[in-house]
Image: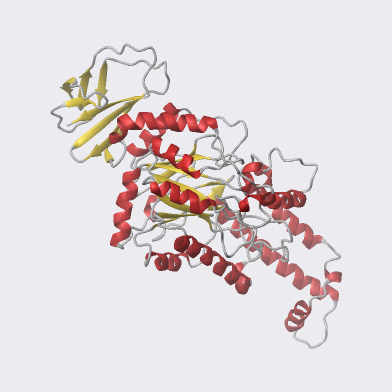
Amino acid sequence: MSEENMHLQEMLRSEKKAEDIKDAENIKQAKEKKGANDIMDAKDIKEIEIKDAKDVIKEIEETEETVEDKVAAGVHNYSAEEEYVMPDDPKVLQKLQWFQDQKLALMMHWGAYSQLGLVESWALSDADAEWSRGGVDWEITGEEFKKEYFNLNKTFNPVRFEPEKWADLAKRAGIRYLIFTTKHHDGFCMWDSAYSDYKVTAEDCPFHTHKYADICAHLFESFRKRGIGIAAYFSKADWHVDSYWSDGYARGNYMHRGPSYVPREHPEQWKKFVDFTQNQIKELATSYGKLDIMWFDAGWVSDIGLGETIEEIRKFQPGMLCADRTMGGPYENYITPEQCVPKEPLNVPWESCITLGTSFSFAYEDRYKTCREVIALLVDIVAKGGNLAINVGPQPDGRLPRGAVECLEDMGKWLSVYGDAIYGTRVCAPYKKDGIAFTKKENLVYAIETFDKESDPVRAEVWIPYEGTVTSITMQDTGAEVEFTRKDTGYVLHLQEYGKETAPIARVFCLK
């Protein structure tokens, strides 16, 4: 049983509840149920109150079960391949081909929460406090913590933010599209939204006078100028707006990921939230240039008319992809595994979002993956038909962490030599076998041998388990011809002895 349900059940056990009932609507309902015109006594009213609260608990339990299926400790599951619906819009299909060519995205989680060095947004949810509030001073109450969190906008001042430098780095790193958090679950907008005062351009945010105050506008334009695609991350949940979270309902101020009320029991309130959400989505699509993708998080939120909104946007942003995570159906144009890689190739478009450090948002003294680790990850994903969205959390002062920058620079150096084996490729059986990963582009097959550690042996004889017909094999980096012999279900490559002390990140062989 969740802490939330225990909280509500404690409320049911309170003998004082019936005595405090003043609401005229409750009295009216009680009168109707009794079938008389006289006012019922407190005991009868209490029975009605308890029944209503039990119904609320049932709703909450059902909602929590659904949410836990989609998200655990802030990490989303991903939709099954069988739930995928291939779009019928020719321009969307064409855009999906573009998407599958890109292979490498830079994802960025950045907002006022970056000042804390905590997980983004999740610590606001009381139901998620146990895993998300590590490092918080527990001398204060949860309510005081939430108040302090929501006031982070008043100290967010990333004066060292330089979007042009970010874009230059991304270009050098071989990044093909950007996924940027326009708004996470906490509701803080990184653009100048007309529908919220909780934003980076509001007067109570010290950054609002800066020349780059409208962060999304400047960041998107800087990346576009360098030929890098734009994906606008947008959380369908908003824990700041009172049409989603409000303490005037049965759960009081004990919040969870979903709305603080049951939408079908409060349709007017839910409509306010839907209108607010649709207006913000349209605002991003109409005022912030070409969007290649809209990337929707908070897979527990549905019934917001997203399909209709996307179709309206596609009238002037033809072919724009929609990634409505974990929802399946026609508006999850590609599947998004999080912090994991599928064991087998997927026969639908997909993208794994994986952190370069240990957290999606900035974490103090974080440890970043090495270039060797990221390239091995990228090769594994691409061989299975996916894209890698490598996430970097910018610092609260507006700079990118040094460890992340160094890794991105090294990635770019490797991709400048071996990128042809990655970009624009498609899957090629046997995908990944005997330590060799395969990709294919037209009539050329790439066999990629990765080395996990610098101390790994680099052999002069390499087994390539590829059964297709091969007439020539060359080294991708030098173009040198490789001697080989056919053997059973593959080829044995005969190479010169490797004379360096440390193993390369990878060797790539081109099979024709």
Q: Nearer the viewer, residue 163 or 237?
A: 163
Which residue is found at the position 38% from the left and 58% from the top?
A: 320
Is residue 490 found left or right of 365 in the rendered image? left
| Quarter occupied by residue 300 | bottom right
Provide residue 182's location: percent of width, then percent of height: 53, 53
- Residue in the picture at 38% in, 43% down: 176
**Residue furthest left in the image:** 471
Vertically, is 301 above or below 490?
below
Q: Is residue 126 visible?
A: no
Q: Residue sitting at 19 percent across and 31 percent down?
A: 467
Going by the image, does 187 lie left or right of 428? right
Q: Tell me, yes or no, if residue 317 can be seen here.
A: yes
At 37% from the left edge and 53% from the top edge, which residue is drawn? 82
Q: Is residue 93 above or below residue 443?
A: below
Count numbered badges in the picture.
0
Q: Is residue 19 above or below residue 511?
A: below
Question: Where does the image place residue 278, in percent across and percent down from the top left?
Answer: 51, 66
- Quarter assignment of residue 422: top left
| In-image side of 148 versus 177 (left or right) | right
Q: Is residue 151 above or below residue 487?
A: below
The residue closer to the viewer here, 151 or 59, is 151
Image location of residue 155, percent across then percent down: 69, 47
Residue 290, image x and y in percent? 40, 57
Quarter containing the C terminus: top left
> What color scheme is it?
secondary structure
Residue that lies at the very extreme toward the bottom in this rendered image: 37
